[in-house]
Protein backbone atom coordinates (compact mmCIF):
# COMPACT_ATOMS: atom_id res chain seq x y z
CA UNK A 1 0.00 0.00 0.00
CA UNK A 2 1.38 3.42 -0.97
CA UNK A 3 1.34 6.08 1.71
CA UNK A 4 0.06 9.61 1.17
CA UNK A 5 3.49 11.14 1.65
CA UNK A 6 5.04 8.92 -1.00
CA UNK A 7 2.21 9.71 -3.44
CA UNK A 8 2.72 13.45 -2.94
CA UNK A 9 6.50 13.15 -3.14
CA UNK A 10 7.26 14.46 0.34
CA UNK A 11 9.88 12.60 2.29
CA UNK A 12 11.39 10.97 -0.83
CA UNK A 13 15.07 10.24 -0.31
CA UNK A 14 17.18 12.40 -2.64
CA UNK A 15 19.84 10.61 -4.62
CA UNK A 16 23.29 11.64 -3.45
CA UNK A 17 25.95 11.87 -6.17
CA UNK A 18 29.48 13.17 -6.31
CA UNK A 19 30.07 16.56 -7.97
CA UNK A 20 33.73 17.01 -7.39
CA UNK A 21 34.62 17.71 -11.05
CA UNK A 22 33.06 19.46 -14.08
CA UNK A 23 32.08 16.23 -15.79
CA UNK A 24 29.99 15.15 -12.79
CA UNK A 25 28.41 18.62 -12.54
CA UNK A 26 27.35 18.45 -16.21
CA UNK A 27 26.07 14.92 -15.84
CA UNK A 28 23.98 15.24 -12.65
CA UNK A 29 22.81 18.88 -12.89
CA UNK A 30 19.29 19.38 -14.30
CA UNK A 31 19.23 22.41 -16.64
CA UNK A 32 16.03 21.69 -18.58
CA UNK A 33 14.26 24.76 -17.19
CA UNK A 34 17.18 26.98 -18.23
CA UNK A 35 17.19 25.51 -21.76
CA UNK A 36 13.45 25.99 -22.18
CA UNK A 37 13.72 29.61 -20.96
CA UNK A 38 16.54 30.35 -23.40
CA UNK A 39 14.60 28.72 -26.28
CA UNK A 40 11.63 30.97 -25.57
CA UNK A 41 13.88 34.03 -25.51
CA UNK A 42 15.48 33.08 -28.84
CA UNK A 43 12.04 32.53 -30.41
CA UNK A 44 10.88 35.98 -29.25
CA UNK A 45 14.10 37.49 -30.59
CA UNK A 46 13.55 35.89 -34.01
CA UNK A 47 9.92 37.05 -34.13
CA UNK A 48 10.87 40.60 -33.21
CA UNK A 49 9.88 42.50 -30.03
CA UNK A 50 9.26 40.26 -26.95
CA UNK A 51 5.60 39.57 -26.20
CA UNK A 52 5.86 41.23 -22.77
CA UNK A 53 6.98 44.53 -24.34
CA UNK A 54 4.34 44.63 -27.08
CA UNK A 55 1.17 46.72 -26.95
CA UNK A 56 -2.28 45.18 -26.76
CA UNK A 57 -3.25 46.25 -30.28
CA UNK A 58 -0.18 44.41 -31.60
CA UNK A 59 -1.23 41.15 -29.98
CA UNK A 60 -5.02 41.35 -30.27
CA UNK A 61 -7.59 42.89 -32.59
CA UNK A 62 -11.31 43.45 -32.36
CA UNK A 63 -13.34 41.84 -35.11
CA UNK A 64 -15.82 44.50 -36.26
CA UNK A 65 -16.74 43.08 -39.71
CA UNK A 66 -19.30 40.43 -40.46
CA UNK A 67 -18.24 37.04 -41.76
CA UNK A 68 -18.22 37.01 -45.57
CA UNK A 69 -19.25 34.05 -47.66
CA UNK A 70 -16.97 32.10 -49.96
CA UNK A 71 -14.97 34.42 -52.17
CA UNK A 72 -15.47 34.20 -55.87
CA UNK A 73 -12.90 32.21 -57.84
CA UNK A 74 -12.27 35.18 -60.11
CA UNK A 75 -11.17 37.37 -57.18
CA UNK A 76 -8.83 34.65 -55.93
CA UNK A 77 -7.31 34.19 -59.38
CA UNK A 78 -6.76 37.92 -59.77
CA UNK A 79 -4.99 38.19 -56.42
CA UNK A 80 -2.71 35.21 -57.01
CA UNK A 81 -0.28 36.97 -59.42
CA UNK A 82 0.20 39.78 -56.86
CA UNK A 83 1.39 37.39 -54.17
CA UNK A 84 5.10 36.54 -53.95
CA UNK A 85 6.19 33.22 -55.42
CA UNK A 86 6.58 30.49 -52.82
CA UNK A 87 9.85 29.19 -54.28
CA UNK A 88 11.49 32.52 -53.33
CA UNK A 89 10.31 32.33 -49.71
CA UNK A 90 13.50 30.48 -48.72
CA UNK A 91 15.56 33.45 -49.92
CA UNK A 92 13.75 35.94 -47.68
CA UNK A 93 14.72 36.72 -44.10
CA UNK A 94 12.81 34.54 -41.66
CA UNK A 95 14.33 35.98 -38.50
CA UNK A 96 14.13 39.43 -36.91
CA UNK A 97 17.56 38.98 -35.29
CA UNK A 98 19.87 41.75 -36.55
CA UNK A 99 23.17 40.89 -38.23
CA UNK A 100 25.90 40.78 -35.54
CA UNK A 101 28.47 42.10 -38.05
CA UNK A 102 27.37 45.59 -38.96
CA UNK A 103 29.96 46.25 -41.68
CA UNK A 104 30.71 43.55 -44.22
CA UNK A 105 33.20 43.74 -47.12
CA UNK A 106 31.17 43.44 -50.33
CA UNK A 107 32.84 42.89 -53.69
CA UNK A 108 32.09 45.90 -55.84
CA UNK A 109 31.09 45.57 -59.47
CA UNK A 110 33.44 46.82 -62.23
CA UNK A 111 31.10 49.77 -62.77
CA UNK A 112 31.30 50.72 -59.08
CA UNK A 113 35.10 50.44 -59.02
CA UNK A 114 35.49 52.98 -61.81
CA UNK A 115 36.75 56.40 -60.89
CA UNK A 116 34.12 59.17 -61.15
CA UNK A 117 36.41 61.16 -63.47
CA UNK A 118 36.78 58.19 -65.84
CA UNK A 119 32.99 57.76 -65.84
CA UNK A 120 32.51 61.41 -66.76
CA UNK A 121 35.07 61.24 -69.61
CA UNK A 122 33.37 58.13 -71.03
CA UNK A 123 29.93 59.78 -70.89
CA UNK A 124 31.26 62.91 -72.68
CA UNK A 125 32.81 60.78 -75.44
CA UNK A 126 29.56 58.93 -76.01
CA UNK A 127 27.65 62.21 -76.28
CA UNK A 128 30.13 63.41 -78.92
CA UNK A 129 29.84 60.07 -80.82
CA UNK A 130 33.45 59.00 -80.25
CA UNK A 131 33.49 55.21 -79.78
CA UNK A 132 36.21 52.63 -79.33
CA UNK A 133 36.91 49.98 -81.95
CA UNK A 134 35.43 47.14 -79.89
CA UNK A 135 32.27 49.21 -79.31
CA UNK A 136 31.92 49.84 -83.06
CA UNK A 137 32.35 46.10 -83.77
CA UNK A 138 29.80 45.26 -81.08
CA UNK A 139 27.25 47.67 -82.59
CA UNK A 140 27.81 46.23 -86.08
CA UNK A 141 27.45 42.64 -84.85
CA UNK A 142 24.33 43.57 -82.94
CA UNK A 143 22.79 45.09 -86.08
CA UNK A 144 23.68 42.01 -88.16
CA UNK A 145 22.19 39.69 -85.54
CA UNK A 146 19.01 41.75 -85.43
CA UNK A 147 18.72 41.72 -89.25
CA UNK A 148 19.31 37.95 -89.31
CA UNK A 149 16.62 37.46 -86.69
CA UNK A 150 14.16 39.61 -88.67
CA UNK A 151 14.89 37.70 -91.91
CA UNK A 152 14.34 34.37 -90.18
CA UNK A 153 10.89 33.01 -91.11
CA UNK A 154 8.35 33.15 -88.35
CA UNK A 155 6.57 30.10 -87.05
CA UNK A 156 3.90 29.04 -89.52
CA UNK A 157 5.25 31.13 -92.44
CA UNK A 158 6.13 29.29 -95.67
CA UNK A 159 7.41 31.92 -98.09
CA UNK A 160 10.33 29.99 -99.64
CA UNK A 161 10.35 26.92 -101.88
CA UNK A 162 12.39 24.22 -100.17
CA UNK A 163 12.99 22.29 -103.40
CA UNK A 164 14.14 25.28 -105.44
CA UNK A 165 17.81 24.88 -106.45
CA UNK A 166 19.33 28.31 -105.90
CA UNK A 167 23.02 29.07 -105.46
CA UNK A 168 22.84 32.53 -103.92
CA UNK A 169 26.47 33.34 -103.34
CA UNK A 170 27.44 29.75 -102.58
CA UNK A 171 29.84 29.54 -105.51
CA UNK A 172 32.39 31.86 -107.03
CA UNK A 173 33.43 31.96 -110.69
CA UNK A 174 36.94 30.50 -110.45
CA UNK A 175 37.14 28.76 -113.82
CA UNK A 176 40.76 29.70 -114.42
CA UNK A 177 43.04 27.18 -116.13
CA UNK A 178 46.16 27.90 -114.08
CA UNK A 179 44.37 27.55 -110.71
CA UNK A 180 44.73 24.11 -109.13
CA UNK A 181 41.78 22.46 -107.31
CA UNK A 182 43.61 22.96 -103.99
CA UNK A 183 43.88 26.71 -104.61
CA UNK A 184 40.19 26.99 -105.55
CA UNK A 185 39.17 25.06 -102.44
CA UNK A 186 41.37 27.31 -100.27
CA UNK A 187 39.90 30.50 -101.77
CA UNK A 188 36.30 29.30 -101.43
CA UNK A 189 36.88 28.13 -97.87
CA UNK A 190 38.37 31.40 -96.65
CA UNK A 191 35.93 33.67 -98.51
CA UNK A 192 32.92 32.06 -96.81
CA UNK A 193 31.42 30.93 -100.13
CA UNK A 194 32.27 27.25 -100.05
CA UNK A 195 29.46 24.98 -101.18
CA UNK A 196 29.41 21.84 -99.09
CA UNK A 197 29.25 18.57 -100.96
CA UNK A 198 26.56 16.15 -99.90
CA UNK A 199 27.86 12.62 -99.22
CA UNK A 200 26.97 10.00 -101.81
CA UNK A 201 25.38 7.73 -99.22
CA UNK A 202 22.50 10.22 -98.80
CA UNK A 203 21.52 9.75 -102.44
CA UNK A 204 21.90 5.96 -102.63
CA UNK A 205 19.99 3.17 -100.96
CA UNK A 206 21.89 0.84 -98.63
CA UNK A 207 20.51 -2.11 -100.60
CA UNK A 208 19.10 -2.76 -104.07
CA UNK A 209 16.89 -5.70 -103.12
CA UNK A 210 13.15 -5.03 -103.54
CA UNK A 211 10.96 -5.34 -100.48
CA UNK A 212 8.61 -7.78 -102.21
CA UNK A 213 10.19 -9.97 -104.88
CA UNK A 214 8.14 -11.51 -107.66
CA UNK A 215 7.83 -15.27 -107.08
CA UNK A 216 8.69 -17.98 -109.58
CA UNK A 217 5.95 -18.46 -112.22
CA UNK A 218 5.76 -22.14 -111.27
CA UNK A 219 4.50 -21.21 -107.78
CA UNK A 220 1.15 -20.10 -109.18
CA UNK A 221 -1.99 -22.01 -108.21
CA UNK A 222 -2.56 -22.69 -111.93
CA UNK A 223 0.91 -22.60 -113.60
CA UNK A 224 1.84 -23.64 -117.08
CA UNK A 225 3.45 -27.05 -117.58
CA UNK A 226 6.86 -25.60 -118.51
CA UNK A 227 7.02 -23.20 -115.53
CA UNK A 228 6.02 -25.94 -113.11
CA UNK A 229 8.66 -28.32 -114.49
CA UNK A 230 11.35 -25.61 -114.26
CA UNK A 231 10.47 -25.02 -110.60
CA UNK A 232 10.65 -28.75 -109.82
CA UNK A 233 14.00 -28.94 -111.64
CA UNK A 234 15.45 -26.11 -109.49
CA UNK A 235 14.25 -27.83 -106.30
CA UNK A 236 15.74 -31.14 -107.46
CA UNK A 237 19.10 -29.54 -108.29
CA UNK A 238 19.35 -27.97 -104.83
CA UNK A 239 18.47 -31.29 -103.21
CA UNK A 240 21.16 -33.06 -105.28
CA UNK A 241 23.76 -30.54 -104.11
CA UNK A 242 22.83 -31.21 -100.48
CA UNK A 243 23.02 -34.99 -101.01
CA UNK A 244 26.44 -34.61 -102.65
CA UNK A 245 27.76 -32.57 -99.71
CA UNK A 246 26.42 -35.14 -97.24
CA UNK A 247 28.11 -37.98 -99.14
CA UNK A 248 31.38 -36.05 -99.20
CA UNK A 249 31.26 -35.52 -95.43
CA UNK A 250 30.61 -39.21 -94.84
CA UNK A 251 33.46 -40.18 -97.17
CA UNK A 252 36.02 -37.96 -95.43
CA UNK A 253 34.87 -38.76 -91.87
CA UNK A 254 33.19 -42.05 -90.99
CA UNK A 255 34.03 -44.05 -94.15
CA UNK A 256 37.68 -43.00 -94.06
CA UNK A 257 38.40 -45.35 -91.12
CA UNK A 258 38.03 -49.11 -91.53
CA UNK A 259 36.31 -51.24 -88.92
CA UNK A 260 38.54 -53.61 -86.90
CA UNK A 261 37.75 -56.50 -84.57
CA UNK A 262 38.55 -56.53 -80.87
CA UNK A 263 41.54 -58.89 -81.35
CA UNK A 264 43.06 -56.65 -84.03
CA UNK A 265 42.47 -53.62 -81.88
CA UNK A 266 44.22 -55.29 -78.90
CA UNK A 267 47.19 -56.38 -81.02
CA UNK A 268 47.56 -52.87 -82.45
CA UNK A 269 47.47 -51.45 -78.94
CA UNK A 270 50.15 -53.90 -77.71
CA UNK A 271 52.34 -53.06 -80.68
CA UNK A 272 51.95 -49.33 -80.07
CA UNK A 273 52.70 -49.62 -76.35
CA UNK A 274 55.78 -51.85 -76.90
CA UNK A 275 57.28 -49.48 -79.45
CA UNK A 276 60.91 -48.70 -78.55
CA UNK A 277 61.45 -51.62 -76.18
CA UNK A 278 64.45 -53.94 -77.00
CA UNK A 279 63.58 -57.27 -78.59
CA UNK A 280 65.37 -60.65 -78.47
CA UNK A 281 68.64 -60.59 -80.53
CA UNK A 282 68.98 -56.82 -80.48
CA UNK A 283 71.12 -56.83 -77.31
CA UNK A 284 73.90 -58.94 -78.94
CA UNK A 285 73.97 -56.76 -82.04
CA UNK A 286 74.23 -53.63 -79.93
CA UNK A 287 77.08 -55.18 -77.90
CA UNK A 288 79.07 -56.02 -81.07
CA UNK A 289 78.64 -52.49 -82.38
CA UNK A 290 79.91 -51.04 -79.11
CA UNK A 291 83.06 -53.24 -79.26
CA UNK A 292 83.77 -52.21 -82.85
CA UNK A 293 83.44 -48.52 -81.99
CA UNK A 294 85.93 -48.84 -79.12
CA UNK A 295 88.69 -50.23 -81.39
CA UNK A 296 88.17 -47.58 -84.08
CA UNK A 297 88.11 -44.56 -81.77
CA UNK A 298 90.86 -42.50 -83.53
CA UNK A 299 89.72 -39.14 -85.00
CA UNK A 300 90.00 -38.86 -88.77
CA UNK A 301 89.17 -35.73 -90.80
CA UNK A 302 87.09 -36.19 -93.91
CA UNK A 303 88.37 -33.08 -95.74
CA UNK A 304 92.09 -32.60 -96.44
CA UNK A 305 93.90 -30.00 -94.29
CA UNK A 306 93.78 -26.43 -95.57
CA UNK A 307 97.08 -24.69 -96.34
CA UNK A 308 97.71 -20.93 -95.98
CA UNK A 309 99.41 -20.28 -99.33
CA UNK A 310 100.07 -16.61 -100.21
CA UNK A 311 98.79 -15.41 -103.60
CA UNK A 312 101.48 -14.37 -106.05
CA UNK A 313 101.49 -11.06 -107.95
CA UNK A 314 100.69 -12.87 -111.18
CA UNK A 315 97.64 -14.53 -109.65
CA UNK A 316 96.41 -11.23 -108.22
CA UNK A 317 96.85 -9.53 -111.64
CA UNK A 318 94.94 -12.32 -113.35
CA UNK A 319 92.10 -12.00 -110.82
CA UNK A 320 91.88 -8.21 -111.42
CA UNK A 321 91.80 -8.69 -115.20
CA UNK A 322 89.12 -11.39 -114.90
CA UNK A 323 86.95 -9.12 -112.74
CA UNK A 324 87.42 -6.22 -115.19
CA UNK A 325 86.45 -8.43 -118.13
CA UNK A 326 83.35 -9.58 -116.23
CA UNK A 327 82.24 -5.96 -115.66
CA UNK A 328 82.87 -5.05 -119.31
CA UNK A 329 80.93 -8.09 -120.47
CA UNK A 330 77.99 -7.11 -118.25
CA UNK A 331 78.00 -3.52 -119.58
CA UNK A 332 78.19 -4.68 -123.19
CA UNK A 333 75.22 -7.00 -122.64
CA UNK A 334 73.13 -4.13 -121.20
CA UNK A 335 74.05 -1.92 -124.19
CA UNK A 336 73.08 -4.66 -126.64
CA UNK A 337 69.75 -5.06 -124.83
CA UNK A 338 69.08 -1.30 -125.11
CA UNK A 339 69.84 -1.35 -128.84
CA UNK A 340 67.64 -4.37 -129.38
CA UNK A 341 64.79 -2.75 -127.43
CA UNK A 342 64.74 0.12 -129.94
CA UNK A 343 63.84 -2.37 -132.68
CA UNK A 344 61.30 -4.03 -130.33
CA UNK A 345 59.04 -0.97 -130.05
CA UNK A 346 56.19 -2.62 -131.96
CA UNK A 347 56.43 -5.71 -129.81
CA UNK A 348 56.50 -3.59 -126.64
CA UNK A 349 53.40 -1.70 -127.79
CA UNK A 350 51.65 -5.00 -128.40
CA UNK A 351 52.61 -6.18 -124.91
CA UNK A 352 51.31 -2.94 -123.36
CA UNK A 353 48.05 -3.21 -125.31
CA UNK A 354 47.64 -6.82 -124.19
CA UNK A 355 48.29 -5.77 -120.60
CA UNK A 356 45.72 -2.95 -120.87
CA UNK A 357 43.14 -5.38 -122.28
CA UNK A 358 43.83 -7.80 -119.45
CA UNK A 359 43.41 -5.01 -116.88
CA UNK A 360 40.19 -3.85 -118.56
CA UNK A 361 38.80 -7.41 -118.40
CA UNK A 362 39.74 -7.63 -114.73
CA UNK A 363 38.08 -4.28 -114.09
CA UNK A 364 34.88 -5.40 -115.83
CA UNK A 365 34.94 -8.65 -113.87
CA UNK A 366 35.34 -6.75 -110.57
CA UNK A 367 32.44 -4.46 -111.50
CA UNK A 368 30.24 -7.45 -112.33
CA UNK A 369 31.16 -9.13 -109.04
CA UNK A 370 30.51 -5.87 -107.19
CA UNK A 371 27.09 -5.49 -108.86
CA UNK A 372 26.23 -9.08 -107.89
CA UNK A 373 27.40 -8.56 -104.30
CA UNK A 374 25.31 -5.39 -103.96
CA UNK A 375 22.20 -7.46 -104.59
CA UNK A 376 23.25 -10.06 -102.03
CA UNK A 377 22.81 -9.70 -98.25
CA UNK A 378 25.84 -8.42 -96.36
CA UNK A 379 27.62 -10.15 -93.49
CA UNK A 380 26.07 -8.47 -90.45
CA UNK A 381 26.80 -11.21 -87.90
CA UNK A 382 28.83 -14.38 -87.47
CA UNK A 383 26.05 -16.35 -89.21
CA UNK A 384 25.51 -16.11 -92.95
CA UNK A 385 22.11 -15.49 -94.46
CA UNK A 386 20.32 -18.71 -95.38
CA UNK A 387 17.43 -18.22 -97.85
CA UNK A 388 14.19 -20.10 -97.52
CA UNK A 389 13.59 -23.24 -99.53
CA UNK A 390 11.50 -22.85 -102.67
CA UNK A 391 7.80 -23.42 -102.08
CA UNK A 392 6.33 -25.89 -104.54
CA UNK A 393 3.44 -28.29 -105.05
CA UNK A 394 3.62 -31.58 -106.86
CA UNK A 395 1.55 -32.20 -109.96
CA UNK A 396 -1.11 -34.16 -108.10
CA UNK A 397 -1.51 -31.33 -105.54
CA UNK A 398 -2.38 -28.68 -108.17
CA UNK A 399 -6.14 -28.05 -108.24
CA UNK A 400 -6.49 -25.08 -110.57
CA UNK A 401 -8.41 -22.82 -108.15
CA UNK A 402 -7.53 -20.85 -105.03
CA UNK A 403 -10.23 -22.43 -102.87
CA UNK A 404 -8.80 -25.95 -102.93
CA UNK A 405 -5.09 -25.10 -103.31
CA UNK A 406 -2.71 -26.64 -100.77
CA UNK A 407 -0.97 -23.81 -98.80
CA UNK A 408 2.82 -23.87 -98.60
CA UNK A 409 5.24 -21.68 -96.62
CA UNK A 410 4.72 -19.09 -93.90
CA UNK A 411 4.11 -15.37 -94.52
CA UNK A 412 5.68 -14.31 -91.21
CA UNK A 413 8.85 -16.30 -91.87
CA UNK A 414 9.01 -14.96 -95.43
CA UNK A 415 8.85 -11.33 -94.22
CA UNK A 416 11.44 -12.03 -91.52
CA UNK A 417 13.84 -13.46 -94.11
CA UNK A 418 13.13 -10.44 -96.34
CA UNK A 419 14.33 -8.13 -93.55
CA UNK A 420 17.52 -10.17 -93.27
CA UNK A 421 18.06 -10.16 -97.05
CA UNK A 422 17.67 -6.35 -97.15
CA UNK A 423 20.24 -5.86 -94.31
CA UNK A 424 17.64 -4.41 -91.94
CA UNK A 425 18.22 -7.03 -89.23
CA UNK A 426 21.08 -9.46 -88.70
CA UNK A 427 20.68 -13.19 -89.41
CA UNK A 428 20.06 -15.06 -86.16
CA UNK A 429 18.87 -18.43 -84.93
CA UNK A 430 16.70 -19.46 -82.03
CA UNK A 431 18.82 -19.40 -78.88
CA UNK A 432 18.47 -22.38 -76.60
CA UNK A 433 18.69 -21.98 -72.86
CA UNK A 434 21.82 -23.58 -71.48
CA UNK A 435 21.17 -25.63 -68.41
CA UNK A 436 23.93 -25.76 -65.85
CA UNK A 437 25.45 -29.17 -65.19
CA UNK A 438 24.49 -29.85 -61.59
CA UNK A 439 26.77 -32.19 -59.72
CA UNK A 440 24.70 -34.42 -57.45
CA UNK A 441 26.18 -35.96 -54.34
CA UNK A 442 24.90 -37.49 -51.13
CA UNK A 443 25.64 -35.94 -47.77
CA UNK A 444 27.36 -38.05 -45.19
CA UNK A 445 24.73 -37.15 -42.59
CA UNK A 446 21.99 -38.57 -44.86
CA UNK A 447 23.72 -41.87 -45.59
CA UNK A 448 22.44 -44.98 -43.82
CA UNK A 449 25.13 -47.44 -44.94
CA UNK A 450 23.13 -49.94 -46.95
CA UNK A 451 22.39 -47.78 -50.03
CA UNK A 452 23.89 -48.69 -53.40
CA UNK A 453 25.94 -46.08 -55.23
CA UNK A 454 23.99 -44.55 -58.07
CA UNK A 455 27.00 -43.03 -59.79
Image: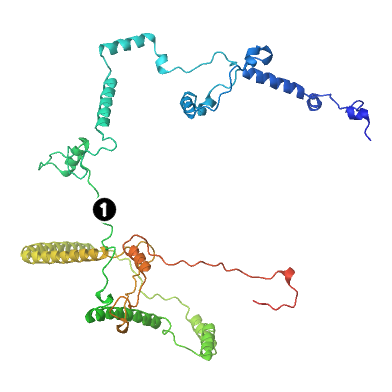
Q: Residue at x 69, y 71 (%)?
A: 442
The residue closer to the viewer here, 42 or 7, is 7
Q: Position of residue 158 (x, y in %)?
A: 24, 39
Residue carrying label 1: 201
Number of marks in the rendered image: 1
Residue 139 vertical position relative to residue 233 in the rendered view, above or below? above
Quadrant for the N terminus in the image = top right
Q: Position of residue 275 (x, y in %)?
A: 52, 83
Q: Is residue 320 visible?
A: yes
Q: Residue at x 22, y 46 (%)?
A: 197
Q: Position of residue 421 (x, y in %)?
A: 32, 64
Mark 1, other Cα within 10 Å: few <14 / some 14–19 / many ≥20: few
Q: Residue at x 42, y 81 (%)?
A: 253
The residue closer to the viewer here, 203 or 368, is 203
Please give left or right for residue 97 compared with residue 300 in the image: right
The residue closer to the viewer here, 105 or 394, is 394
Residue 309 vertical position relative to residue 49 in the rendered view, above or below? below
Residue 372 vertical position relative to residue 197 in the rendered view, above or below? below
Q: Position of residue 104 (x, y in %)?
A: 53, 15
Amino acid sequence: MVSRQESIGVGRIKKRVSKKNKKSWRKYTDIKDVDSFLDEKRLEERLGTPFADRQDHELFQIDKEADEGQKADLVVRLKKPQKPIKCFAILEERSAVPDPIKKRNRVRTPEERKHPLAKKIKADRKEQGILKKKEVIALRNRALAKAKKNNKPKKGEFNADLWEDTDNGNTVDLDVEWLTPTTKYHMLKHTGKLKKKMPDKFLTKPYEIPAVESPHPGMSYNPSYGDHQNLLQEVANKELILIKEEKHLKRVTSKMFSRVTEDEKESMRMKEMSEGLPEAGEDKLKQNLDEGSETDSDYRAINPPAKNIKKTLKKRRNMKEAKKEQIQHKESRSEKKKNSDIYRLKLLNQELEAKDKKLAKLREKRERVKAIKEKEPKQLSKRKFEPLDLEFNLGEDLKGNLRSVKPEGNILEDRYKSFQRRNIIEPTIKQRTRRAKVKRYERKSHKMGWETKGY
